[in-house]
Image (tube, rainbow, N blue to C red):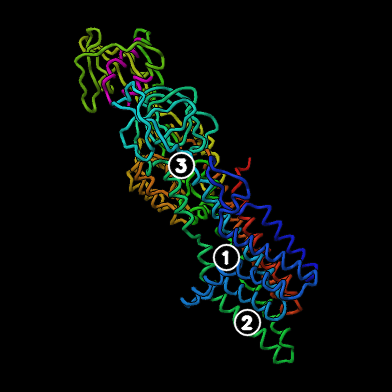
Amino acid sequence: MNALSCLCIVGAVSITEARPTAASPPPAARGSALATLVRLAEARWAGLALAAFLVGGLLVLAGAPAWTWGPVLAVCYAAGGWEPALEGLRALRARSLDVDLLMVVAALGAAAIGQPVDGALLIVIFATSGALEAWATARTEESVGGLLALAPARARRLSGDDGGDDDGEDVAAEELAVGDVVLVRPGEAVAADGVVVAGAADVDQASITGEPLPVAKTMGSEVYAGTIAGGGALRVRVVRPAADSVVARIAALVEEAAGTKARAQLVVEKIEQRYSVGVVAVTLAVFAVPLALGSSLDDALLRAMTFMIVASPCAVVLATMPPLLAAIANAGRRGLLVRSAPVMERLGAVDAVVLDKTGTLTVGAPRVAEVAATDGDDDALLALAAAVEGPSEHPLGRAVVAAARERGLPAAPVLDFAAAPGAGVRGRVHGRLVGVGRPDSDPGALAPVVAGAEGRGDTAVVVTDLVADRPLGVVVLRDTVRDEAPDVVAGLAARTATPPVLATGDHPRAAGVIADRLGVTDVRAGLLPEDKAGVVERLRAGGRTVAVVGDGVNDAPALAAGDVGIAMHGVELTVRAADVVVLDGGLARLPWLFDLGRRARRTVRANLVIAAVLIAGLVAWDLVGHLPLALGVAGHEGSTILVALNGLRLLRGPRS
C-alpha cells in the first residue's frame, strides 16, 4: 500500500470522527457523540468497514501472510458494500443501472487484479460518503422536526369552563381534547396549542416563532405547544389536538419537504440512467481496446476499473438536495416553513412580490388611535363608549373596550343593549341612552375630525346622546402597520427587479395611506379574490417569478397562482394554498428568506460545477495518461464528500 493510500486512510478517519453521522436526538435525550454515531445504521456499517480496513491495512504493511489480512479486508468489503450492492441488484432487476452498483463492481474488480487494499479503500470512502449523506438528511429533519420533543408528554387538566380552582388531574398530552383547560405553571412548557383564559405570563416562544424575547400573554392570547411560561401561571383552553399543533405541522412540513425533489435534482436523475449505461459501455471499450492493442490483462482491467470509478456521477447526484434541504431546515428554525425543495429553489429566482395589506403588512385588528370629545373630556367619552360596546362582539367594539381597559377606565354597566348590523350599538349607561356607530348624518363640530380620519383611511365612530340627538364625540380606529413592515417592504424592493405590488380589497384611499407609510408605489385596491390572482398572472405572463404574501381566505387564489405563495400563519385555507408558512415574528425575515434561496441556488450550481470539473479532469487523466486507482478513488469520493459538506453550510444561521 502506497503513501497516498495511507493519506486517504487518515482523511477517511478524520471525516468519520470529526463530523456527526446521525441526527441529534431531542434536547432531553441528547447524549454523547459516540451514542449519536451508533444510532445511525449507515454510520455503524461505515465504522465497521473502516475498522476492518485499518486492521487489514496494518497487516499488509507489516508483511503478514494473506490468510491473516484477507478475511479482514473481506469484512470491510461486506460491511461497506452489502447495502449498495443489494440496492444496485434490485435496480438492475427493474432494468435500471444504479451508480452504487458501479462502485461495488469497481471495488471487486480492483481486488480481482491484485489491488484488494485499493478496492477496500474505495468501499470505505464510499461507505463514509453514504453515512455522510444519511447524516445530512437526519440533521435536516432533526433541526426542525425535533421541535416535537419540546411539547411536554404530560399536562395538568382542570375541570370547568375556565379551569375552576381545583388542582386538576395529570394526563398524557395526547389525551387532551379541544375545549379542555390546562394549567401551565411558571417554568413549564405549554402542552397544547390554545388560548389563555386566565392568568398572565411572559412566554418564551423562540423555538416556534424565532422571536428572541419572551412575549407577554394575557387573556385571549394564543399560545403554542412547546413554548415556556415564565413569571406567572396560565390557564389555557386547548384549541387544537396534539396531532394538529403547530409543532406537529412543522414536522409534517419538513417530512413533506424531504420527500420532494428540486428541478435540478430531477434533471440529474433523468440523465443518470443513460449516463450510467454510457459509463458501462465506455468502460468495456477502455478495457477491450488496450487489450486488443497488446496491453496486459491486469493493466487493461485496472484502467477500466479506474475509469468506472472516476466517471460515476455520485457527486452530481448529491449536488442538489443537501443544500436545499439544509436551507429548508435553517428557515424552519426561524419561523419560515418551506414546504419542499422545489419551493426553496424557486425562492432564489423570485424577482417580483405581491403583498396583501390587512393582516399581512398591518396587524389586522383595529386599535383606537384618537379620541375627541365635544366637552374635552376624552377619557370620559372613551369610558362611555366602552360601556356601550361591552356586550358587543364586533371587532371595532372590542378595540374600544380594550383601549378603555388599557387606560384603566372604570367599566360601567349597560342596560337595554341592542346591536343593529351595519349601524352600530346602543345602550343605557347611568340612565343615559347612548349610541355608538358610523357617522350617518352631519356630526356638526366633529366633522373635521371625521373627515380627517376618513381621509387617512381610518375608521371613525360617533358617540351620540340619542335622547338629545347630539354627538358627544368621535373615536378614531386604525389598523396599525406592523412594526417590521417598512423594513420588510424596503428589503423586498431591494431584492426584486420590480417594486413590490400592494394588492388589497380595501378602499383605494385606505390602501393609499398604508402604501405611503410603507413606501409602496404600485397599489392595486378594491380587488376581489379573483382580481388578486389576475394581478399575479399578469406579472407571470410578463416573465416574472412572483412571490405572493397574504393571510386571509381571500388571498388563497393569489397564493396558488404565484410561483411561491407565502401565508401568514392562521387561516387554514390560506396555509393549505401556500408554499411557505410564516409563523408569528417571521415576517421580518422574508428578505433573509429570499437571500437564503439565492444562496441555495448558487450552492447547487457551484456543486454541479465542482462535480463536473472533477469528474471530467479525472476521466481525462485516466484516458490520456495513467491515473492511479487510489488517487481516482480519493478524487471521486472526495468530490462527493465536498459537495455534501458544501451544501450543509446552509444549516448555519443568518448572515448579519
Residue 418 drawn in magenta: no
Q: What is the magenta segment's predominant secondary structure?
A: helix
Q: Residue at x 54, y 43 (%)?
A: 29
Sequence-earlier tag: 2 or 1: 2
Specify the label residue 282 is tagged with. 2
Asked if 294 appears above or below 508 in the picture, the reply is below
Marks 1 and 3: which is nearer the front? 1
Question: Residue 578 versus residue 45: which sits nearer the camera?
Answer: 45
Residue 41: horizontal and vertical position, in percent? 56, 58
Question: Residue 53 versus residue 405: which sits nearer the camera?
Answer: 53
Specify the label residue 582 is tagged with. 3
Label 2–label 1 contact, CB within 8 A: no
In space, the residues marked 1 and 3 are separated at their CA atoms by: 31 Å
Q: Which residue is mark 1?
A: 317
Residue 195 visible in the shown view = no
- Circle 1 sits in a helix, a strand or a loop, which is it? helix
Q: Residue at x 49, y 42 (%)?
A: 147
Disc 1 crowd, CA 10 A, few/some/many (<14, 14-19, 20+): many
- Circle 2 sits in a helix, a strand or a loop, which is it? helix
Disc 2 crowd, CA 10 A, few/some/many (<14, 14-19, 20+): some
Q: Residue at x 50, y 62 (%)?
A: 263
Residue 640: horizontal and vertical position, in percent? 64, 63
Amino acid on which the number 2 mark rests in the picture = Val
